[in-house]
């Protein structure tokens, strides 16, 4: 998860200490002017703009680590693998059939 | 049976057509986005709508872009799969439109491989070939793993080519395994029963170069890597492999720094980086290639047929010549040939092959047309001219095909402006005429005088009149010119020392300088000296094969602006294998020919001379096509009775 936070939110600030936010419903995130706002997505493709590293880390660890672009590409790659495996299986079957025929 | 064959061929043609056309139609035809013609200075539509319009839609809307010279189509491999074949952006620079077409490296490897595999399948299977490679499955798997390792070892190159790929995740490599394994297996299944014939098809490697777009890999190396594994597992070429292991140990020990290299026109046959993994991969690649080639030649040299070889050579030469004209005139062909012929570099933009440099005594500007290197192309044409002339002298006949290819090769050689090859071809023709015909002394004298006159004309009379002291120092002067004030390479240090103190090496270096001057290599070899900075180990053993990254990145010099290669395969070998490897290689080259001397005829000898001179002054060894062609010719001349080869 730590790697994912770094990938989406950037490197951890020096001396970063995780605050228990979930147990505090009144917690208000403070904007960090030095932090470039980042858009994060959840699995249903809802998005939210986060304005500080603490906020970003909180969302990402809470499951808002979904990247629609990366995910779409991963789906395409999986489909491509499946098509390849399937085509290869058919190719091997045809080859085997041809070999048997030649014998 | 014939009917089945015709249907099979029809199906193959149909598949080829689909592969050629369909990728560029990929788009959503039900959305509201309609392609528009490019305005004079307005590219905004395509900036707002990237990856929405297919190339076919775009061409339909703006057909003039396919033939007007201020349009350039370029592949953008760093695109998502869904963006494949679509316009991903258009940039206007100096009144030139650069139209970027989205492609994806993973789709490229599938499309291009299938395309070339189908082309291979047109070749008739060899019915008489009994050679079955040993350890077939293991070698196939090892070849696949090696290709995966090629990606892992050159992450920096592939980071800019793979749109989404996590180099740290094992599952990513599983995806690569599926991709490579399927391609390797099918390719080997198709090519193995045709391997005997392949020995006659090698000139086609200059036409179908086979470099995969988005990869630093040539598809046609796969069968040789496979044969290489099979050969090593069978403990063949033990001596060679043992000596190589010794070199490998030094290279690995030496690979403790990291450099990267823009592969440019060498892509597919050179390392993109210098670090431990890249050194290991390219070292393995090279020895496997050599082992594979040796097995290939040993097992299949009997199928070499000079007539067929010359025929295919002529066909390739004609196509390369015509494609050169086509790609330099029509932007859309420039784009498509890059993909379907597997070029390392786009065809030349300049459509005038007669251009001269008015700032340099109206010196003809080399024109490379379709091929990435004008110099290697000149060698390719020159060799064909020699083959046709030899065949004509021997048979007193010339076919229409040979005649056309002879004419076009002559023009191609002129366009490429390879003066050394022109002189070599004339020299070979002269020697063949003298040895094959009973010629009177007066005609001999006339022929020799004519050759000398042409030689002086090509080299330039004024160039031969300068004093030796001046000509021999040009190399040193050029090296100093490119030296950066802050750092000096160890080889230039040596040169400075030798020239200042005039030690015994001074005469050796001066002579080398004079040769470089005659071959018009003073600047390029001077650049090499300014760059080359080996430590003792590197000087003795080199820094690993097919790796120029360290050479080009270690020492800062006054950059000439573009990638200028050493223009000498001997110097490249010096970088790769050090002085020991180079001397050993040259010794083997000469010894093998010497041992076989009684079976080498005059044409074989001239071919060896042709190859050696070109190795001295061109980068041929760094191009897969030239590497294979020269290796094959050398093997044939030094292993088969020459009168049997060139029948």
Image (cartoon, coloured by chain):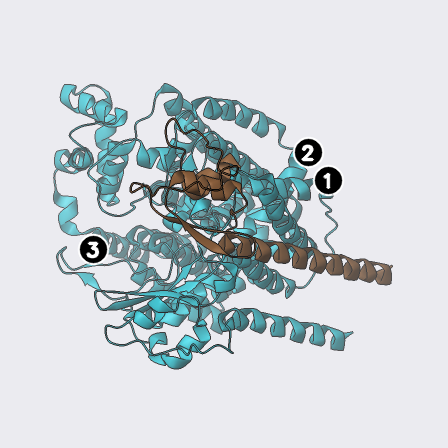
Chain colours: A brown, B cyan
Among the 4 quarters of the image, the one containing residue B469: top left
Q: Residue at x 54, y 72 (%)?
A: B22
Q: In this view of the protein, can residue B592 be seen by the observer?
A: no
**Labelled pair 1, 2 in contact (Cβ < 8 Å):** yes
Decide which of B256, B342 is in the foreground and name it: B256
Among the 4 quarters of the image, the one containing residue B546: top left
Residue B429 coordinates in the image, percent (x, y): 38, 56
Letter of the chain that mark 2 sits on in the rendering:
B
Residue found at the very far front of the displayed protein = A26
Q: Quadrant of the C terminus of chain B?
A: bottom right
Residue designated by label 3:
B457
Identify the secondary structure beneath mark 2: helix
Q: In this view of the protein, can residue B251 be seen by the observer?
A: yes
Residue designated by label 2:
B233
What crowding class fits label 2: few (fewer than 14 Cα within 10 Å), some (14-19), or many (20 or more)? few
**Labelled pair 1, 3 in contact (Cβ < 8 Å):** no
What crowding class fits label 3: few (fewer than 14 Cα within 10 Å), some (14-19), or many (20 or more)? few
Residue designated by label 1:
B135
The answer to whether residue B631 is above or below residue B125 is: above
Q: In the visual, does B108 lie left or right of B418?
A: right
Task: State the CA–CA distance, disc 2 to disc 3.
Answer: 55 Å
Q: Residue at x 49, y 36 (%)?
A: A3
The answer to whether residue B172 is above or below residue B339 is: above
């Amino acid at each position: 998860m730590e790697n994912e936070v770094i990938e989406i939110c950037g490197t951890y600030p020096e001396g970063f200490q995780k605050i228990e936010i979930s147990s505090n419903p009144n917690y208000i995130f403070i904007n960090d002017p030095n932090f470039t706002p980042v858009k994060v997505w959840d699995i249903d493709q809802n998005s939210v703009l986060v304005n500080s590293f603490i906020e970003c880390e909180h969302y990402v660890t809470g499951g808002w680590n979904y990247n629609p672009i990366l995910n779409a590409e991963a789906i395409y790659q999986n489909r491509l693998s499946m098509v390849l495996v399937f085509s290869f299986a058919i190719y091997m079957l045809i080859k085997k059939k041809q070999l048997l025929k030649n014998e | 049976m014939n009917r089945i064959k015709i249907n099979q061929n029809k199906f193959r043609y149909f598949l080829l057509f689909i592969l050629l056309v369909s990728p560029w139609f990929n788009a959503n035809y039900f959305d509201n986005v309609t392609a528009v013609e490019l305005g004079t200075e307005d590219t905004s539509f395509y900036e707002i709508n990237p990856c929405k319009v297919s190339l076919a839609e775009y061409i339909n809307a703006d057909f003039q872009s396919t033939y007007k010279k201020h349009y350039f189509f370029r592949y953008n491999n760093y695109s998502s799969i869904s963006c494949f074949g679509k316009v991903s952006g258009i940039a206007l620079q100096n009144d030139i439109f650069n139209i970027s077409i989205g492609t994806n490296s993973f789709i490229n490897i599938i499309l291009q491989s299938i395309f070339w595999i189908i082309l291979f399948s047109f070749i008739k299977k060899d019915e008489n070939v009994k050679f079955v490679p040993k350890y077939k499955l293991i070698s196939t798997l090892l070849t696949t793993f090696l290709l995966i390792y090629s990606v892992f070892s050159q992450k920096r190159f592939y980071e800019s080519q793979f749109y989404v790929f996590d180099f740290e995740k094992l599952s990513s490599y599983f995806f690569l395994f599926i991709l490579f394994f399927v391609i390797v297996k099918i390719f080997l299944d198709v090519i193995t029963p045709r391997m005997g014939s392949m020995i006659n098809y090698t000139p086609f490697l200059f036409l179908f170069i086979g470099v995969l777009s988005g990869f630093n890999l040539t598809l046609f190396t796969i069968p040789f890597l496979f044969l290489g594994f099979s050969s090593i597992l069978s403990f063949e070429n033990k001596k060679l492999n043992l000596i190589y292991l010794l070199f490998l140990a030094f290279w690995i020990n030496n690979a403790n720094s990291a450099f990267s290299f823009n592969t440019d026109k060498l892509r597919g046959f050179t390392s993109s980086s210098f670090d431990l993994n890249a050194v290991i991969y390219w070292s393995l690649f090279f020895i496997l290639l050599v082992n594979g080639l040796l097995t290939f030649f040993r097992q299949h040299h009997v199928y070499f047929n000079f007539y067929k070889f010359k025929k295919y050579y002529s066909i390739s030469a004609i196509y390369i010549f015509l494609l050169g004209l086509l790609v330099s005139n029509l932007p859309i062909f420039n784009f498509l040939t890059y993909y379907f012929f597997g070029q390392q570099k786009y065809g030349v933009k300049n459509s005038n092959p007669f251009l001269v440099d008015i700032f340099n005594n109206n010196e003809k500007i080399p024109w490379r047309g379709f091929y990435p290197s004008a110099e290697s192309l000149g060698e390719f044409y020159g060799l064909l001219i020699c083959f046709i002339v030899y065949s004509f002298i021997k048979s007193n006949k010339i076919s229409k095909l040979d005649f056309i290819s002879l004419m076009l090769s002559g023009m191609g050689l002129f366009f490429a402006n390879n003066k050394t090859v022109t002189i070599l071809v004339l020299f070979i023709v002269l020697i063949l005429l003298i040895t094959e015909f009973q010629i009177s002394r007066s005609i001999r004298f006339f022929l020799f005088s004519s050759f000398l006159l042409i030689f002086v004309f090509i080299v330039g009379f004024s160039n031969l009149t300068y004093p030796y002291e001046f000509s021999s120092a040009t190399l040193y002067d050029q090296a100093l010119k490119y030296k950066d004030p802050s750092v000096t390479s160890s080889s230039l240090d040596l040169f400075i020392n030798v020239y200042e103190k005039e030690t015994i090496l001074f005469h050796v270096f001066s002579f080398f300088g004079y040769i470089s001057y005659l071959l018009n290599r003073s600047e390029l070899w001077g650049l090499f000296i300014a760059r080359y900075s080996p430590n003792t180990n590197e000087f003795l053993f080199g820094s690993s094969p097919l790796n120029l990254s360290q050479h080009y990145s270690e020492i800062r010099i006054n950059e000439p602006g573009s990638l200028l290669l050493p223009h000498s395969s001997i110097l490249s070998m010096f970088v790769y294998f050090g002085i020991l490897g180079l001397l050993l290689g040259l010794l083997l080259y000469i010894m093998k020919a010497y041992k076989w001397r009684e079976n080498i005829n005059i044409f074989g000898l001239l071919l060896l001379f042709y190859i050696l001179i070109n190795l001295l002054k061109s980068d041929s060894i760094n191009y897969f096509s030239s590497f294979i062609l020269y290796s094959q010719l050398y093997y044939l001349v030094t292993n088969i009775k020459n009168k049997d080869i060139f029948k």
